[in-house]
Amino acid sequence: MPSKDKNHSLISFADQELVLESLERDQLAGLKKPLIPRRRLKGLEKFVLWSLRIYLIFMMAVVVYQVWIGTH
Amino acid sequence: MGVGPLSRVTPQAITQEDVVITHEDVDRAHDRLRVSAARAQRGVFSRFRLLWLLVGPGILVMLGENDGPSMLSYAATGARFGIGFFIPFVVLTFCMAVVVQEMTMRLGSATHRGHAELIFDRFGPFWGWFSMIDLGVGNFLTLITEFIAIRAGLGFFGVPPWAAVVSALAFLCLAVITHRYWTWERTLLAIAVFNLVFVPVALLAHPDWHSVGRALLTWKPLPGLSKDTLIIVLADIGATVTPWMLFFQQSATVDKGLTKKDIHLGRIDTVVGAALAATAAVATILATAPLFARHMTAENFQAAEFAQALRPLIGRFGAALFALGIVEAGMVASVTISISSAYAFGEVARRPHSLNLPMAEGRVFYSVLFLCAVTAGAIVLIPGLPLIYVVLLVNVVAVLAMPPALVFLFMLANDREVMGDLVSPTWANILTTGVVVFLALAGILFGISVIAPSIFAFLGGK
């Protein structure tokens, strides 16, 4: 029996069969909702990530400064 | 028991009671059926057919990154430095791009999740939204530059700015109107290959092939160390390795439906894309190298000005091809970059995100896509805005934002809980570490040159 997706447009039984045969389980759009468990960051990983963010903010300030002196 | 990719998903058979099947799934299943049929057959023709079916994200991301400002960066490189160090350097940057993009393709094929989604899930909402904002700002600035390039390129043919922007938006609409990933991909591939129009332009410039060969082998003549050189170096790196590429190729790989079985051909797709893009990039440098030989100041040229300057050297036809190439580069990139933003937003906001979505199911996805493009196009039409600074700085910003993005990629590609046995091999990790360090050093040097030019001069700069 044809099923309906969220927007109530019909999907034929043949297409449902095709989907179930052709796609891997976690390729289905409806199965993407469950979250992958959160990774527990170790000390070094936290240090690297925060260092990079500080680097990025610093460099963005440099770019803004460059634009400012360029436009003045 | 070994840890498999996304081991939270049990390997049980799917039943119709388990899930709601959507049109997105049906379209993807039809694409996968063709792949399975080609894979089941033997023979050289079937191998090529399989490759033909699976190529796309890699070629599109590489040719998409040969965008308007990138081609102008390569043109400025040729005009400023001629044939020399930058020819092999640009080839090297594409080798770096292959190392990085291969990881995104592998991540997408193994997890069936986009890059933004994985960062959000594995590192939490703070890092997820931070990356999303990084990407969104960078993409928006880049989109503005694409419209500048389109406007400038079409300006060569006398097209008014408003008509150029409307044409680009119409092209974007046409590219996604079928609501079918496969049709979109094939259409865009056909247009993206037009990036190679810079090859005949280079041939019309009659480059000295002996100098080209010597430059490729010896990296000489070397440019002097100066702030201008550094900006060109950063611009050329930014023209090849940028954050949106990571998000785009992984999301496109997922949308196309690639699986672990497809990784080998996904690598070929990425390498072919890099080879095509490197060819177009080197051709652009060669095309404008005659300007260097005639000592013409061209570093701040836009597309139309390059085309005008090249006209006495390569003829009207060659100049027109150059301008058309810039238009094509801007148009293809405006599509891929808008889609990259829409994919990432959908992944982080947990809204449907696929080019297979009908308009009714993908309102948010298509709204983000069009909103980004329309706003960027409108900004370009505001008179008096200092657009040249956006063009000059956008690639530099991309380089500065790249190291953090690469670190997330590196951690995800080595995350055994996510990738299972497909974690990066040691040689790939060594290469990636080298790329991250190289990009970070380039960014730091740029920072020093701006805030402490005296230190930079002490280091040997001018």
Image: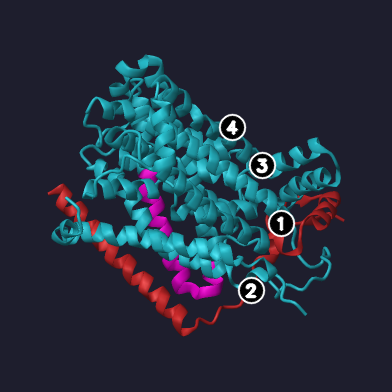
Chain colours: A red, B cyan
**Callout 4, which amino acid?**
Ala
The residue positioned 74% from the left and 62% from the top of the image is: B20
* Residue at numbered disc 1: B259
3 vs 4, front mark: 4
3 vs 2, front mark: 2
Q: Do marks 1 and 3 share a subunit?
A: yes
Q: Counting residues from the N terminus, which is met first, the one under dot 1 or under dot 3?
A: 3
Residue B103, horizontal then vertical, whole percent: 57, 59
Give the spatial CA distance, label 3 vs label 4: 12 Å
Secondary element under disc 2, as helix, strand or loop, is: helix
Query: Which chain is mark 4 on?
Result: B
Residue B395, horizontal then vertical, whole percent: 35, 49
The residue positioned 71% from the left and 60% from the top of the image is: A27
Give the spatial CA distance, label 2 vs label 4: 37 Å
Q: Is residue B258 above or below residue B304?
A: below
Badge 4 density bin: few <14, some 14–19, many ≥20, Cα 10 Å: few
Residue B316, horizontal then vertical, whole percent: 36, 15
Give the spatial CA distance, label 1 vs label 3: 16 Å
The stretch in magenta equals B119-144
The residue positioned 66% from the left and 61% from the top of the image is: B112
**Callout 2, which amino acid?**
Arg
Query: Which chain is mark 2 on?
Result: B
**The label number, if any, that marks residue B190 in the structure image:** 4
Q: Is residue A38 above or below residue B243?
A: below
Q: Main SS of the magenta segment?
A: helix
Horizontal side, residue B235 vs residue B225: left or right:
right
* Residue at numbered disc 3: B182
Residue B32, horizontal then vertical, whole percent: 76, 49
Badge 1 density bin: few <14, some 14–19, many ≥20, Cα 10 Å: many
